[in-house]
Amino acid sequence: MGIDLANYETKAREAIKAFWGNRAAAQQKQMEAGVIDRGERAGVTGGKNLDGFITLILDIVRANGLHAADVHLTKRLVTLPGYFRPTKQWDLLVIHQGRLVAAIELKSQVGPSFGNNFNNRTEEAVGTAADFWIAYREGAFGQQLAPFVGWLMVVEDAPESRSPVRDATNHFPIFPEFQGASYQKRYDILCQKLTREKYYTSAAVITTPREAVGDGFYSELSQLSSLRTFVTAFAGHVATEAAQFPSPPSLFQL
């Protein structure tokens, strides 16, 4: 039996509509309260922005046989031990019969500031993965097969994120793939490298304009960093876990 992608394209479009809708609602709430939000912090800290993608992940887990898995979202239940630091809170964990099946980070970035945020997201992604895999090697999660470790980024499709960016270094040249690359392209490169270097099982970036609040439109930048590649890898991992360790159906625990 093949893996089930749980109609991910339709659900991703619904997730995008909710992403922009929730951001707009948070900003409107601050405006009504008389708060000036020059950096669009309300849209970032408003919460619930990426819940549509959590729903997609839950559906993939169900559709591929892990009916008895515990899918954790609350802060006290998404904390894992680290190696260089005591703990790290993930956005979502999948636990099945005491095994860590998946740890996933869901991130987003909108304008106007793409430069500093890109660098911060990159450092965070690399550091999180390095800490995680050494902790895994040292037995922090017990003796088990490697879990699925995922990183999914949603980026605003805007002129500032599409435009070429110039960088200069005084002593040594930057790698050719980054020369003149837009921030969208840089996220594509980042995701490809995070996967190729095995920092993450799969890393994906999708772009979407603000107007997508109505239709949920999004774009993928390459096959290697696409949402389809991400959900296919995740569904395959879930199906493998279900085949190796079958269990009777049960309700998900959030």
Image: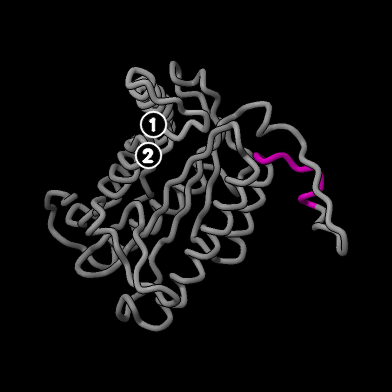
Q: Position of residue 252 (x, y in %)?
A: 17, 49
Q: Amino acid at mark 1?
A: Ala
Query: Is 82 located above or below residue 221 in the figure?
Result: below
SS of the residue under disc 1: helix
Query: Is 1 located above or below residue 31 in the figure?
Result: below
The foreground one among 18 and 89 is: 89
Q: Is residue 179 magenta?
A: yes
The foreground one among 244 and 168 is: 168
Residues marked 1 and 2 touching at CB (< 8 Å): yes
Q: Which residue is mark 2?
A: 53
Q: For residue 221, what is the image quadrant?
A: top right
Q: Residues within 10 Å of mark 1 (few under 14, many from 20)?
A: many
Query: Is 236 located above or below residue 38 in the figure?
Result: below
Q: What residue is rendered at 44% in x and 20% in y?
A: 213
Q: Which residues are magenta?
A: 177-184
The foreground one among 224 and 205 is: 205
The span from disc 1 to disc 2 (Cα, nearest Å) is: 6 Å
Q: Which residue is mark 1?
A: 15
Q: Is residue 116 visible?
A: yes
Q: Amino acid at mark 2?
A: Phe
SS of the residue under disc 2: helix
**Mark nearer the N terminus (1 vs 2):** 1
